[in-house]
């Protein structure tokens, strides 16, 4: 994961297309959030790990053929600036230049998902989903601010489904231009 400690947690993502290599030697197209520093798209997206109380800033650029966004369920007071107004939040068009900035304070320790809120029925399927872990202020080795949630070892399992037929149709340009609303 991408760990940011302290009162500020900054992330820069690019939504982009890439391919997953399958065990049989094939590959499947996907869309993923990439850490802008590495440019490597992930399926699912990078895990963001922050401290409780941190001001989280996520910058998003998009190189995909559809506008995308990021929503943060379980987080309060998320503000979005830049880009264009969408149904649930500001969206980044597919020009690769326009940046949307999302900001919130990580108030509630725990593990959460994040995903595109623009066309979630397609964009989550394609891989625009990831995890956000908010570490409790009470210290490391706890899931929440309670001694009852202490742990020695931590594992994150973020399970997703992938329908190769949909991914192939998107890769061939048969879905991206269709209004799925």
Image (spheres, rainbow, N blue to C red):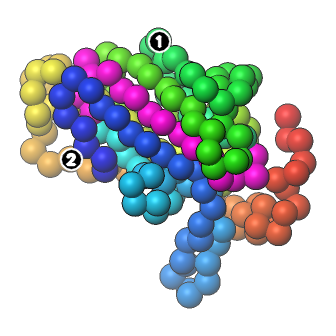
Asked if residue 116 lies in the magenta stretch, the reply is: no
Numbered mark located on residue 67 in the image: none
At horizontal 54% and vertical 77% (from top left) the residue drawn is 21
Mark 2 is surrounded, within 10 Å at the Cα level, by few (under 14), some (14 to 19) or many (20 or more) other residues, namely: few
Q: Between marks 1 and 2, how big is the CA–CA gap? A: 28 Å
Chain-order first, disc 1 or disc 2: 1
Mark 1 vs mark 2: in front: 1
Q: Is residue 82 left or right of residue 118?
A: left
Q: Quadrant of residue 52?
A: top left
Mark 1 is surrounded, within 10 Å at the Cα level, by few (under 14), some (14 to 19) or many (20 or more) other residues, namely: few
- Position of the C terminus, as image quadrant, is top right
Asked if residue 51 lies in the magenta stretch, the reply is: yes
At horizontal 36% and vertical 27% (from top left) the residue drawn is 56
Residue 179 at what x, y percent from top left? 89, 41
Residue 54 at what x, y percent from top left? 27, 22
Residue range corresponding to the magenta coloring? 50-66
Residue 115, above or below 39 = above
Residue 58, above or below 2 = above
- In contact (CB < 8 Å): disc 1 and disc 2: no
Q: In which quarter of the image is residue 171?
A: bottom right
Q: In this view, does 181 lie to the left or right of 107?
A: right
At horizontal 69% and vertical 53% (from top left) the residue drawn is 64
Numbered mark located on residue 77 in the image: 1
Q: Which residue lies furthest to the top in this view?
A: 77
Q: Is residue 179 visible?
A: yes
Q: Is residue 160 visible?
A: no
Q: Which of 77 and 12 is in front in this view?
A: 12
At horizontal 32% and vertical 21% (from top left) the residue drawn is 55
Q: In this view, does 103 lie to the left or right of 160?
A: left
Q: Name the residue under label 2.
A: 154
Q: Which residue lies furthest to the bottom in this view?
A: 25
């Amino acid at each position: 994961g991408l760990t940011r400690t302290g009162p500020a947690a900054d992330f820069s993502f690019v939504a982009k297309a890439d391919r997953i290599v399958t065990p049989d030697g094939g590959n499947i197209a996907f869309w993923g959030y990439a850490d802008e520093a590495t440019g490597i798209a992930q399926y699912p997206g990078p895990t963001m790990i922050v401290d409780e109380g941190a001001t989280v800033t996520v910058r998003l650029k998009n190189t995909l053929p559809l506008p995308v966004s990021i929503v943060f369920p379980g987080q309060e007071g998320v503000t979005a600036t830049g880009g264009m107004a969408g149904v649930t939040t500001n969206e980044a068009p597919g020009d690769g230049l326009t940046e949307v900035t999302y900001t919130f304070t990580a108030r509630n320790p725990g593990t959460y998902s994040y995903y595109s809120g623009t066309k979630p029925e397609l964009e989550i399927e394609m891989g625009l989903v990831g995890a956000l872990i908010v570490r409790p202020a009470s210290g490391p080795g706890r899931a929440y601010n309670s001694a009852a949630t202490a742990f020695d070892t931590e594992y994150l399992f973020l399970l997703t489904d992938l329908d190769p037929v949909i991914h192939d149709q998107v890769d061939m340009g048969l879905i991206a231009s269709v209004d799925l609303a």
